[in-house]
Amino acid sequence: MKDSHMQRGQQWLEELLQLSAIPSKVVGEQQKDCYWMTIDDSNLTAEQVAILVGPDGNVIDAIQYLCNTVQNIGQEVEESIPYTVELNGYRIRRQEELRSMAEYAADQARSTGVEFELKSLSSAERRQVHSFLSECEDIETYSQGQEPDRRLVVRLR
């Protein structure tokens, strides 16, 4: 059953790319907590890759959001499995940036004793930072504010 969800995600994403006049294959891989959908960029121009990623990852984030929304319609929250859409190593690079930001925020909270806010993160990125810092016994995180101005706050416990 899980494999059929992954195949549906691949087909949906390939169709979206086809409709966008940027046809490409999508390679799906099941990871422990998500389906990782990698858009094959071997036949894409640098301009097409830039269009699909968008400024600050806005386009790839929107594609990922749509994929998750469409593929999990009618699923109970606990049954839905997230899809991560990757292109040209963007998610891997961004994950390293987020890890660095999380570590910096934790260091600032520790050294100053003052809450440190991280702004301009998508909900998926906020979840990643929460996850990174959940291992720190002296640090806690929470989100505050309303979209599109929702912020992640890092502070001492």
Image (spheres, helix red, strand yellow):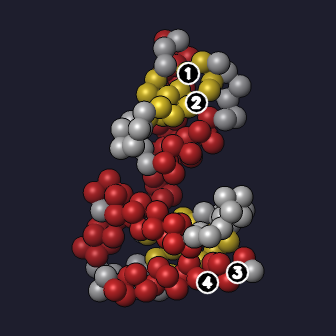
Q: Name the spot of residue 43 as percent of width and height, x first.
A: 36, 86
* Residue of label 1: 155
Sequence-first tag of 3 and 1: 3
The amino acid beneath tag 4 is Gln
Whether residue 62 can be seen here: yes
| Mark-to-mark CA distance, 1 and 2 | 6 Å
- Using residue 36 as the reference point, say whether residue 17 is left or right of it: left
The amino acid beneath tag 3 is Asp
Q: Name the spot of residue 79 as percent of width and height, x first.
A: 71, 64
Assess whether mark 1 and mark 3 are in contact (beta carbons under 8 angstroms). Answer: no
- Using residue 47 as the reference point, say whether residue 140 is left or right of it: right
- Residue at the image position 56 percent from the left and 17 percent from the top: 110
Assess whether mark 4 and mark 2 are in contact (beta carbons under 8 angstroms). Answer: no
Q: State the SS at label 1.
A: strand
* Residue of label 4: 7
* Residue of label 2: 141
- Residue placed farthest to the left in the image? 47
The amino acid beneath tag 1 is Arg
Neighbour class for label 2 at 10 Å: few (<14), some, many (≥20)?
Answer: many
Sequence-first tag of 3 and 2: 3
- Residue placed farthest to the right in the image? 1
Q: Name the spot of residue 71 as percent of width and height, x first.
A: 56, 73
Mark seen at residue 3: 3
